[in-house]
Image (cartoon, rainbow, N blue to C red):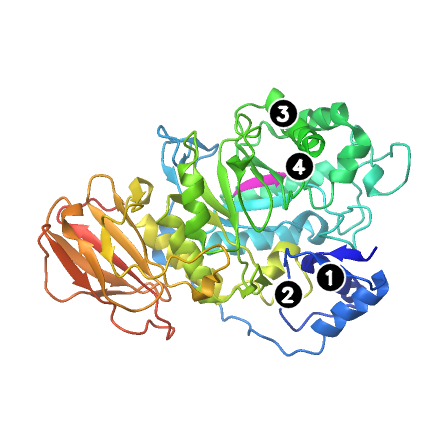
Amino acid sequence: MGLVFTMRQSYHLATSVMWKLELAPTVVSEGRMKRRIASGLSLRGFAVFALSLILPLSPLITAQTAFTPSKSSRRAPPPAYPLKLSANHRYLIDHDGTPFLIAGDSPQGLMSRLTEDEADAYFADRQAHGFNTMGWIDVLCAGNDFPDNKDSSTVDGIRPFTRYVSGGADYEHYDLSKPSEPYFARLDHIVTLASKHGIFVFLDPTETNGWLPTLRNNGLSAAYAFGQYLGNRYKDFPNVGWLSGNDFVTWKDTKDDALLQAVAKGIKSVDPEHLQTVELNYDTSSSFDDPTWVPLIDLNGTYTYSPTYMQMLRSYNQKPAAPVYLLEAHYDQENVGRPPDYGTPPTLRREEYWTMLTGGSGQFYGNFYTWSFSPGWKYYIDTAGVKQLTIWKDFFMSFPWYELVPDQDHSIVTAGLGTYGDFQTRVSDSDFCTAAKTANGTFVVAYMPTVRTITVNMAALKSPANAKWFDPTNGSYKTTPGGTFANTGTRQFTPPGKNNDGDSDWILLLEAAGAPRD
């Protein structure tokens, strides 16, 4: 049979060579393409093929200039951990009861790629840009996502386990009952460094893109005991949550599902308070799609490469109610999905604003260079996508985002919605307008990927309202002429042309008189 690889694997077959040659890639790779590729090439041949794709090309992006965080991101006090569910289970709150908007990066390979000093600097950078969550860090890094790390060791050679079960002496045969104290002490330090920077960390105990063979070789009892080990070790770290899975395409196999759940159940048996969630399969899924996980987890994550409003609304409408968030979608500087779509700033903005207007309580941003910490990551860490995510966060933090209810029946925006599309529609091609309002009618928000006229039912507002257009590329506002608009009948609104980046997406913000500002 031919070998089967993901595009993420093909990249790392190439970059494992680059690490040894100390070559920084000069191009954005195809990255995490989850489409499976059947090939008759040998492993070496496939690596050479991947290198031939990567090395000759010129850069697709340029380094970003230093970014100064916005005033609101600088002045925001750090959250008081731990986190818990709000009373209506629609969003997270911190220990003081303050709503917590998930603004996450996804540094999955941090444990195997960075020293503690590098991790500290990385967290400081993310804090300065308004990130409050790491979603997620792999506890163990080997396998498909990290094929150059054969034993899941840290950058200075510390392995996570000290012995093997029968059948082999590779990471797939690590004995989960023999954890290495120096390795997990390193993870303790990483979590503590994140806490210093006010960052909440989702840890993935046994990510399923690489560690299912290890779970199978150890069995249910050992998986449960390993979960108990992790739960006991981290139950007193207030800034920790647990995210199981990662491209968990075999969750419908009851044996694989039981093994992964054994780890989660082990954690929960000794630490029922820390949040848990799970990532299931690409190209599109919600955590609650697997009903056997629902009693174990607290958050319902959306994983999609399609326009995010489609699966976000599915997640939002699943029962029981739970915080819905964008777990994984197109990453900055990557080309993923079916059909493929490149992670440009306009694509990322669509995902981000659609998410919040279809029931979202936040999202995990991702960047090719900082999920894997591939060579060159320090050069590509602060992109336009990062700057505009800070703008996204500041916008929603400026009013009660946690009270937004999605306009599912189009009773708010009644015309000019654009084309809904289907799961094969490219994010970059979708022009669909999403909208939401706060339950008490103080705010109406509509995101328009392209310029055209929309019709708004002004009776959705509780009182006469002002209208402003928000530019998601630079955070500026443009007031709509006409002053205060009556909250009766309908009114048409048209965006003011191109935004600051020369693109066509805008956010309409209608604010009723006397509306409270956060």
Q: Are marks 2 and 3 in contact (CB under 8 Å)?
A: no
Q: CA distance from mark 4 to mark 2?
A: 27 Å
Q: Nearer the viewer, residue 269 or 95?
A: 269
Place of residue 504 in the rendered image (x, y in percent of width and height, measured from the top left):
34, 70
Q: CA distance from mark 4 to mark 3?
A: 12 Å
Instruction: Tell me the mark number nearer the camera, choosing from 1 and 4.
Output: 1
Q: CA distance from mark 1 to mark 4?
A: 24 Å
Give whichever of discs 2 and 1 has the lower sequence position: 1
Residue 383 drawn above or below residue 116: below
Query: Which residue is rendered at x = 73% and y = 28% of the image?
Result: 223
User: Of helix, strand and loop, which one carries label 4?
Assistant: loop
User: Of helix, strand and loop, which one carries label 3?
Assistant: helix
Question: To which residue does mark 1 refer?
Answer: 10
Q: Are marks 2 and 1 in contact (CB under 8 Å)?
A: yes
| Quarter of image, res 285 | top right
**Is residue 468 in the magenta section?**
no
Q: Main secondary structure of the magenta part?
A: strand
Q: CA distance from mark 2 to mark 1?
A: 9 Å
Q: Are marks 4 and 3 in contact (CB under 8 Å)?
A: no
Q: Are marks 1 and 3 in contact (CB under 8 Å)?
A: no
Q: Is residue 328 left or right of residue 156?
A: left
Q: Nearer the viewer, residue 185 or 56?
A: 56
Question: To which residue does mark 3 refer?
Answer: 265
Instruction: Tell me the mark number nearer the camera, choosing from 4 and 3.
Output: 3
Which stretch appears magenta?
A: 200-204
Place of residue 396 in the rendered image (x, y in percent of width and height, measured from the top left):
33, 50
Q: Nearer the viewer, residue 305 or 106?
A: 305
Give whichever of discs 1 and 4 has the lower sequence position: 1
Identified by mark 2, the residue type is: Glu
Residue 385 drawn above or below residue 160: below
